[in-house]
Image (cartoon, rainbow, N blue to C red):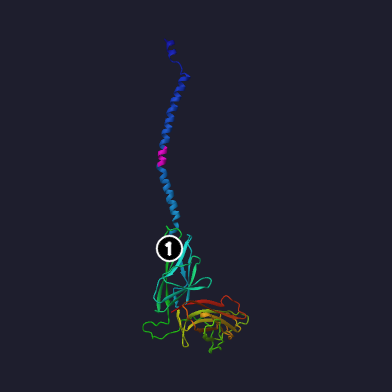
Amino acid sequence: MNNQLIEEQKPVTEEQKSAFTKVLAIFGFFALIILMVWLAVKIVGVVPNAFSSLASIADSVYNYQDDETLSVATEKSVINAGESFTITWETLSTSGTYNFSFACTDGVAIEVRDDSGATRSLSCDTPLDVSDVQSLDIRVSSEKNRFTDVRYTLAFIPEDTKKDIITKEGLATIVNATIPTIGDVAEEEPAPVKEEPAVTTPDEVVVKPTPATPVVTTPKPTTPTYVEEVVYSAPVSDPNGQTDLQVTYKAVGIMVGSKFTPKSRIEVGEKGAIQFEIKNIGTKTSAAWSYEADLPSGIEYNSGTQKVLKPQERALITIGFEGISETGTEKFGVTVDTNGDNNSKNDAFTWAVSIVK
């Protein structure tokens, strides 16, 4: 019986082991396929959200500049009519163009001057392309009211049309001191002239120089007239100092008799006039000096030799001219000349005036 039991407990053969291994391999293969299918389903569900998050991040980075603002500054907000002031701004990192404009205001005219010194009149509510500069030299004239508020706007237009236009508004108050306020005597006052302090003595001398003969370069029958007033305050001159004659534009207008009246526009047939100042801002008495004026209508005027100017002395000069027969923009300018002037950058100016009917 024991022999029979021993025969029934024979060991597993190699063929049986091989068959069992194959069965396990088949089950493992199918389990792996099922696992891969499950993972694929999960990945398909997660990837769109990941791409959506990346797209949101990219969109946030791309539109970061939309929150940028224009930074605009001006040296002063209250300006005398006829005076110049400067508006500056900082450019944005986004590509685009910049425009400047001002709101239409009754009796207000604006002229701008670029870096080259050229001037031109600017129409209200009409954008001026200022993409190539970061500042504007502006002169505002006001003829209706003593106090006038002028609103101006700097606009940035991005190249990307999907982005919004960025604007910055400003306000300048123009004061015309020649127009009386309510309750004042209606008497015309001279245009305000910014005086600089000077050392004075008890005696003040007013000298009227002998007018020189004007030179007319065009055949037009016009002869400029001028009134010059030099105020001597007798300050001390430093023999070891330097001379610096500076010419400064003051105003443009018309002559009524011998009286100068500032105006932003000159009508055809009126007797026009320009006013400017020549001042010794150095520390040493100047040599004899002269100036040359290029007036509208092609008139050239040479002053001839003028008396010396001591430190801080000035000559306020008004030149009248006739012969304006056409409308448009007429340029004018003045150049001062003397020996020993150590600064030639302030020896000349150029401006322009509008001629209307």
The C terminus, quarter of image? bottom left
Q: Which residue is mark 1?
A: 166
Q: Position of residue 164 (x, y in %)?
A: 41, 60
Q: Is residue 256 above or below residue 1?
A: below
Q: Quadrant of residue 187?
A: bottom left
Q: Position of residue 333 (x, y in %)?
A: 53, 78
Seen in the image, is 279 located left or right of residue 184? right
Closer-to-camera residue (188/355): 355
Q: For residue 64: magenta?
A: no
Q: Position of residue 167 (x, y in %)?
A: 42, 65
Q: Main secondary structure of the magenta part?
A: helix
Q: Residues within 10 Å of mark 1 (few under 14, many from 20)?
A: some
Most distant residue in the top direction: 1
Q: Quadrant of residue 143?
A: bottom left
Q: Is residue 163 above or below residue 286?
A: above
Q: Position of residue 84 (x, y in %)?
A: 48, 75
The N terminus, quarter of image? top left
Q: Secondary structure at mark 1?
A: strand
Total marks shown come to: 1
At label 1, the amino acid type is Ile
**Residue at 44% over, 51% down:** 57
Most distant residue in the front direction: 219
Closer-to-camera residue (346/227): 227
Most distant residue in the left direction: 183
The range drawn in magenta is: 39-44
Q: Is residue 205 above or below residue 298?
A: below
Closer-to-camera residue (276/38): 276
Q: Quadrant of residue 44?
A: top left
